[in-house]
Amino acid sequence: MHDKIVLVNLQKQYATIKSEIDPAIQKVLNDCDFIQGQAVKDFETAFADYCETRYCAGVSNGTDALYMALVAAGIKPGDEVITQANTYIATVLAISRVGAKPILVDADPHTYQIDPVLIEKALSTRTKAIVPVHLYGHMAPMDDITRIASKYGLRVIEDAAQAHGATYKGKRAGTFGDMACYSFYPGKNLGGYGDGGAIVANKEAYDAKLRKLRNYGEEKKYVHVEKGFNFRLDTLQAAVLNVKLKHIDNWNAARRKHAALYTKLLSQIPGIQLPKEDPNQSSVYHLYVIQVDKRDELLEFLKRKNIYCGIHYPIPVHMQGAYSDLKLPKGMYKVTEAAADRIISLPMYAELTQKEIEYVVDCIKEFINGTNKS
Ligand SMILES: *Cc1c(COP(=O)(O)O)cnc(C)c1O
């Protein structure tokens, strides 16, 4: 039996950076600056540089980042915010948390990114913002989105939780919208060893607002100018992220190389829909997602071969009990619903080897040849 191949192998990554991570954590323990410590400040500077934005505020996680960005953008109860139906539920949860109504639109069936034609159709007099999601590490069609936003005076908040380092026409995720929100959940391209997030922006006013909001609405010690939250990034997480940020470009390059190999090998097997990249963008392949018939059977078959894949995401947001109040019937989002039954995310992380990818592809080939015969 082949060694186990998982969707994301964080242990393999830790082994390659242990000699940098352990002393970075030890330094925080020695300094005991656990809250808004030096590593947080260092990380904010470095991550703003990385995103090619002027400001970065470290926060508690990606979901809180989206919520705070919507608050900072002035989104209020009764407003409508457009996002895509095939996103992770956290995007939509942030919209409902500000009291706004999430307006879901379908995605392109090949790139999985929000369909700009459908954004324009979904506009109403109450629309205040668009939250494009750079899903799977690909970039949303930002030219169309920013054009629509400026035509109708809408805010744009990028959900870049899966797209650290991705570019559209050479510009990084985060430089298009009013703000962009990142998650450092451990399994993301840039992940901490616990929860974490950040919001990047170019406008000073947004950054100043976000810094107050994350820290009890405090302007200076014990002076509270608004009703804020406790949404800070831990110093320990920032220390981990500072180490990992130095490696992210290499890791993303490895992911792209793995994606190219998957695509080359899988394109020789009939009946598989491969991921398609918009030529304007450069993906960081947070996930490598293909579509097949008999997806659930393939998932089980691969498990028996010691390969563990994922589904992102098996139940679309509008079909979740949490959003029954939106009264969006099954059949509303054809691309999202069809994809939910057919998508499978193959193992994807920098430390994957060529042999492992070949083994995964061979097993998929064996499954497809087997089902074609029967
Ligand atoms: C992970 C993720 C989030 C939420 O981030 P957390 O840090 O887990 O709260 C939001 N949107 C998308 C698209 C994500 O993948």
Image (cartoon, rainbow, N blue to C red):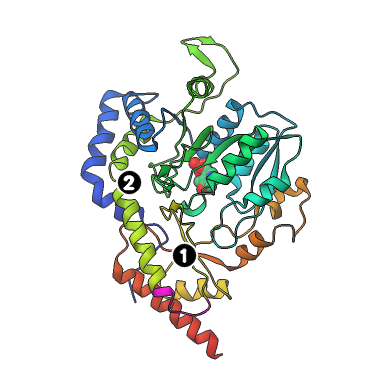
User: Secondary structure of the magenta portion, mostly?
Assistant: loop
| Residue at mark 1 | 309
Q: Which residue type carries mark 1?
A: Cys
Q: Which residue is drawn at the image coordinates 67% and 47% (left, top)?
A: 119
Residue 253 lies in quadrant: bottom left
Q: In which quarter of the image is the C terminus?
A: bottom right
Q: Is residue 269 magenta?
A: yes
Q: Which residue is drawn at the image coordinates 70% and 58% (left, top)?
A: 333
Q: How crowded is mark 2: few (under 14 residues within 10 Å), some or many (20 or more)?
A: many
Residue 256 in picture, x, y percent from top left: 36, 58
Q: In this view, does 128 lie above or below 265?
A: above
Whether residue 342 is visible here, answered yes or no, is: yes
Whether residue 5 is visible here, answered yes or no, is: no
Judged left or right of residue 84, residue 249 is left
Q: Which residue type carries mark 2?
A: Ile
Residue 239 in picture, x, y percent from top left: 32, 34
Q: Which residue is drawn at the image coordinates 61% and 62% (left, top)?
A: 340
Of the image marks 2 and 1, the number of the one nearer the N terminus = 2
Q: Does dot 2 land on a helix, a strand or a loop? A: helix
Q: In this view, does 94 lie above or below 119?
A: above
Q: Does the magenta stretch include residue 94?
A: no
User: Is the CB of the residue bearing disc 1 within 8 angstroms of ligand 1?
Assistant: no
Q: Does dot 1 land on a helix, a strand or a loop? A: loop
State which region is magenta. Answer: 265-271
Residue 16 in picture, x, y percent from top left: 24, 51
| Residue at mark 2 | 248
Q: Which residue lies furthest to the left in this view?
A: 19
Q: In this view, does 78 lie above or below 273?
A: above
Count of marks placed on residues: 2
Q: Residues within 10 Å of mark 1 (few under 14, many from 20)?
A: many
Q: Which residue lies furthest to the bottom in this view?
A: 373
